[in-house]
């Protein structure tokens, strides 16, 4: 004796097929996805009917709507293989993953640029410090009187070679 009448099963299968068509067209409820759980919820049938059952002797028997779950999976796979994405969240996830990879690449490039600029800054600061030290040394040498001024251009030097 079946647990549900043939009439109820036919009515449930019609509701499942209608819900299946809606989901595969992309008409998803706000909190739903394109999956068996949402299909069962939208059709108003228990989700357990889509899965195989075990008899008391351990053998497996098909669930009353398992053939519809297989059909749903087949149609969903063919849509995805054809490039259609009935669940907009799947497309959004793919776009976000791609954007994330792009942004990670940009961050890596910026990190490399920052490293190069820090090295350049350190080298520039070292050069400035060395030049400052040389200027200080030359100023001290000039103040001590050991440095003589060179003649201005156009003046004869102290001792002419000619």
Image: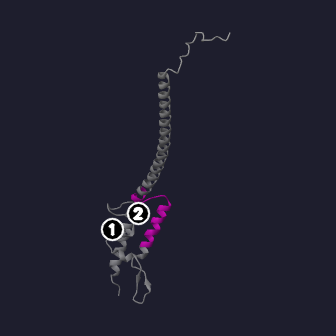
Q: Which residues are magenta?
A: 69-91
**Marks 1,2: beta carbons within 8 A:** no
**Residue 22, image x, y percentages:** 37, 63
Considering depth in this image, is 55 or 78 the residue closer to the camera?
55
Q: Return the residue nearer the eye: 32 or 160.
A: 160
Residue at the far right in the pictured view: 162
Query: Which is more toward the observer, 82 or 87?
Result: 87
Q: Which quadrant is the C terminus positioned in?
A: top right
Q: Position of residue 1 (x, y in %)?
A: 35, 88
Label at residue 42:
1
Rendered view: 97 above or below 48: above
Residue 122 in magenta? no
Colouring scheme applied when the structure was drawn: one colour
Find residue 54 and report its image quarter.
bottom left
Gap between marks 1 and 2 measured at Cα: 12 Å
**Residue 132 position within the rendered picture, expressed as x and y whole percent measured from the top left:** 47, 30
Circle 1: is it few (<14), some (14-19), or many (20+) Cα within 10 Å? some
Q: Is residue 31 left or right of residue 116?
A: left
Q: Which secondary structure lies at badge 2? A: helix
Q: Main secondary structure of the magenta part?
A: helix
- The image's mark for residue 109 is none
Graded by Cα atoms within 10 Å as few (under 14), some (14 to 19) or many (20 or more), the crowding at tag 2 reads: many
Q: Position of residue 87 (x, y in %)?
A: 40, 60
In this figure, what is the number of numbered marks? 2
Residue on which the image places disc 2: 24
Identify whether 62 is placed above or below 74.
below
Query: Looking at the image, which residue is at 49% across and 36% down?
Result: 124
- Residue displayed at 35% across by 81% down: 6
């Amino acid at each position: 004796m079946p647990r549900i009448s043939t009439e109820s099963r036919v009515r449930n299968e019609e509701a499942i097929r209608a819900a299946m068509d809606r989901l595969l067209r992309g008409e998803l409820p706000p909190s739903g996805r394109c999956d068996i759980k949402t299909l069962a919820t939208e059709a108003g049938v228990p989700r357990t009917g889509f899965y195989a059952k075990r008899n008391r002797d351990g053998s497996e028997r098909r669930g009353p709507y398992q053939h519809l779950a297989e059909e749903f999976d087949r149609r969903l796979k063919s849509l995805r293989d054809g490039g259609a994405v009935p669940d907009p969240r799947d497309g959004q996830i793919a776009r976000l993953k791609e954007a994330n990879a792009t942004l990670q690449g940009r961050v890596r490039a910026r990190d490399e640029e920052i490293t190069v600029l820090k090295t350049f800054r350190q080298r520039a600061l070292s050069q400035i410090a060395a030049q400052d030290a040389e200027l200080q040394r030359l100023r001290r040498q000039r103040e001590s009187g050991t440095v003589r001024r060179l003649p201005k251009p156009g003046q004869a030097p102290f001792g002419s070679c000619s």
